[in-house]
Image (cartoon, rainbow, N blue to C red):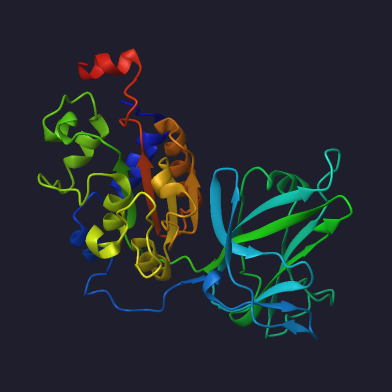
Amino acid sequence: MFISKKLSFIYSAVRGLSLLLILSLSLIFGCTGRPDTEPETELPVIPLVYLSPFIGNETEIRTPPPEPERISVREESVEGWLAPDEGVLRFPVRIMNGARLSLRLGANYDLKGQSAKAPNFTATIEYHSEIPPKPSETGETPSPVIYEFSLEQKSQCFFNWQEVDISLDNFPPGKGEIRFIADGLETDEGTIRLMWGHPTVYHPDKRRHKNILLIGVDTLRADSLSIYGGRPEVSPNLELFSQTSTTFMQARSQSSWTLPSFASMVTGHLPSTIGAVEYSGHLPQRATTLGEILRPMGYATQTICTNAWLGNRQSGFEQGMDGIWYRNDPPAQTAIHQVYEFIMRSMGRDWFCFIHLMDPHAPFNPPRAMLDQIGG
């Protein structure tokens, strides 16, 4: 129906790398572990949102440490740390050979007049090792600066999250400190809220888990798909995928509508247990989601959502997710493009992506060509 080149790419990624989860709840949580024969090793990913940062310079430190927050840039909200008004955001870390730092930079601003311009700020990342760096052949001490955001990145971070992936190979393995430095965030013309989005130190490892793509399509009848008796031209990629995958012929939703159904899907609990059954309901903090299981295992986690019950800030579905992209009922191609972008920027890591599509949902006004294709 709405197959595009990007959907074909995603299918290829799933077929070659990933495990497609449209399964029963017990199977979802049974698939997240590693085989018994695989030796246990230290996890190679250190999400900085799980570390306790501190703010200040070399002589003054603020306590208690700041808490992670979530801000939105256009349709996507990301968890991370707001740059402090004064001082430097500092994280103690330990790196190994081949370490890399990934993060996303986003910003909002509050201007004090229609003609005011956003402040021209600076944003820099430094790494300070406990082991003093060796001077170069010319006797110069290597700079601790590992990244400085360009003028273009700084101007674009108000409209789209800016992706950064940095090698730490120039620094010796061991303990150190990553410092996020921002200056010029407040002027007479306005104030910038700068977000260091989900900074993560990771170590690319040949030992990989399965990537996970969880696809939810609202109100899609099973018998409209060829694998369940529908016409083969309607869903050719799913038909092809089913030939090399496990297909369940019996599956039952845990509720008649979106919020409790997907609350059960991502937690493994019945709606009567989890409590997200009313229109004013939400996924409670006490619930452990699939994202909260996978993220500590090193997975990059992302939700691409087109339904307000799952995408609004009060739904609770942000638990365990690095980022949530939400737009109310866009065409499927728009959401699929976001999945493509997420997979491309997560190629060096294990990833979990939950995409929710609304195209089959009311109002039922598909293009005439689609109706002809499915015999409508």
Q: Identify whether 8 is placed above or below 350.
A: above
Residue 13 position by quadrant: top left
Identify the residue at image location x=34%, y=29%. 3
Q: Is residue 114 left or right of residue 281?
A: right
Task: Please name whichever residue, 107 or 47, is drawn nearer the observer in this view of the structure.
Answer: 107
Is residue 207 something one can see in this rendering? no
Q: Identify whether 179 is placed above or below 375.
A: below
Identify the residue at image location x=38%, y=45%. 355
Which part of the image, by quadrant, shows the N terminus? top left
Residue 150 lies, in percent from the top left, at: 75, 51
Residue 93 position by quadrant: bottom right
Task: Please name whichever residue, 363 or 180, is drawn nearer the observer in this view of the structure.
Answer: 363
Q: Identify whether 283 is placed above or below 215.
A: below
Residue 178 lies, in percent from the top left, at: 66, 73
Which part of the image, by quadrant, shows the C terminus? top left
Most extreme residue toward the right, as rendered?
188
Identify the residue at image location x=79%, y=83%. 58
Residue 91 lies, in percent from the top left, at: 63, 76
